Amino acid sequence: MRKSFRVKTEKDFQAVFEQHNSVANKMFIVYVMEKPAQKHLRLGISISKKVGLRGHERVWVKRRIRQSVLELKPQLKTDVDILVIARPSAHDQPMDVIKHNIVHVFKLADLFTEVPVAETDTKD
């Protein structure tokens, strides 16, 4: 994801935390802040040392979260800031389990847009 699609500064993180709009499942906590004037979603990821003591373990989890969100991006709302906080159970999980849990927690947060029904082209 490009840096313009990320929540990076402490000020931005705190603004989203102060909204207190969060949902959680066994692997992730997600905070959401609506920003109607925003043209694209922004994602912030936080991985504590409880998830993995070594830096490369936390980066491993962070990359899988970012990839999962990137694959879901076309289906997500664009006018929000999203913070994903990993819980210790996210450590050493395969990609499909992480993505499944991301989808679950995003559904709880109502972050998906309505998928339009594909029109079928009929040729006479």
Image (cartoon, rainbow, N blue to C red):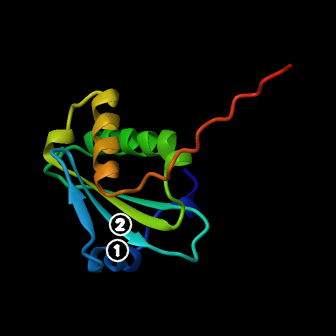
**What residue is pinned by disc 1?**
16
Furthest-right residue in this view: 124
Residue 20 locus on image (x, y percent): 24, 75
Residue 70 locus on image (x, y percent): 50, 44
Q: Is residue 123 above or below residue 45?
A: above
Q: How many marks?
A: 2
Query: Counting residues from the N terminus, which is met first, the one under dot 1 or under dot 2?
Result: 1
Q: Is residue 38 above or below residue 61?
A: below
Amino acid type at image mark 1:
Val
Q: Is residue 95 above or below residue 16?
A: above
Kindly state the secondary structure of the residue where label 1 is placed. helix
Whether residue 110 sits left or right of residue 49 in the image: it is: right
Whether residue 102 sits left or right of residue 111 in the image: it is: left
For the C terminus, the image quarter is: top right
Residue 55 locus on image (x, y percent): 27, 46
Give the residue at x 34% y 30%. 95
Name the disc covering residue 26, or none: none
Q: Quadrant of residue 2?
A: bottom right
Tell which of 72 and 50 is nearer to you: 72
Mark 2 Cα-neighbour bin, 10 Å: few <14, some 14–19, many ≥20: many
Q: Is residue 99 above or below residue 62?
A: above
**What residue is pinned by disc 2?**
32
Give the residue at x 44% y 45%. 69
Q: Nearer the viewer, mark 1 or mark 2?
A: 2
Amino acid type at image mark 2:
Val
Give the residue at x 17% y 52%. 49
Q: Quadrant of residue 91?
A: top left
Asked if labels 2 and 1 touch by Cβ distance under 8 angstroms, the answer is: yes
Furthest-front residue in this view: 124
Kindly state the secondary structure of the residue where label 2 is placed. strand
